[in-house]
Image: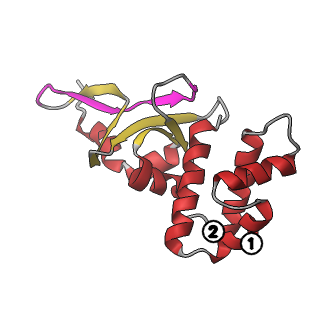
Amino acid sequence: MLTPENFINEFKRFARLTQDTNLTYCQNLDIRSIEFGFRDFYQLQHEFPNLNSKQAWAISSRLMRRLCAIVEPDSNKVFYIFTIEKARPSHCSYHSMWAGDDKDGREVRVPRRVYFKRLEYPFPVYVIENEDQFSAWRCDWFGTAYLSPEIAEKYFISAFLHRARVVTG
């Protein structure tokens, strides 16, 4: 869950990314606040820190989900693409590449690094760059996500360990 300070910063980031050019920045903050159940941005700033943890989690998760679905990270950054299905949350799949063969001649596949490109999909694709976003995606949203290397290698380490099974020669 986001701390109140991080929530406000992420909320402002969301408002900038979804800025209506016919409105001022402050008006846009108020409109976005209404979307999250607050009267205006002033109320959001003052009431969010006082919400119970369940309410704060629900609002934080909604904000992060919307933000991760629209954010455009630096095109020079690399990511891994992982998918977690809601029907099978303990199972993940990933875009992979061939790493070699194991001692029994079976192919070994490992996660493949890709550069981010926001394409049109019939489903949301999230960009996960920190642990708060990762927790919300893995526990609440599910679906397909571009994961930063730090997050992917930390939380899906078993996918990367397959490379050790490759034999040379």
Q: CA distance from mark 1 to mark 2?
A: 13 Å
Amino acid tagged 1: His
* Nearest to N terminus: mark 1 or mark 2: 2
- The chosen color scheme is secondary structure
In this picture, residue 42 sits left or right of residue 33: right
Decide: is 72 above or below 10: above
**Which numbered dot is residue 46?**
1
Can you say which quadrant of the picture contains the N terminus?
bottom right
- Residue at 40% x, 52% y is 138
Q: Which of 40/167 is in front?
A: 40
Range of residues picked out in magenta: 104-118
Residue 40, position in %: x, y? Answer: 77, 59
**Which numbered dot is residue 3?**
2
In this picture, residue 118 sits left or right of residue 89: right
- Residue at 41% x, 30% y is 112
- Residue at 75% x, 67% y is 43
Q: Which class describes the residues within 10 Å of circle 2: few (<14), some (14-19), or many (20+)?
A: some
Residue 81, position in %: x, y? Answer: 44, 34
Residue 41 falls inside the magenta stretch? no
Taking the image as drawn, is residue 139 in sight?
Answer: yes
Residue 149, position in %: x, y? Answer: 50, 43
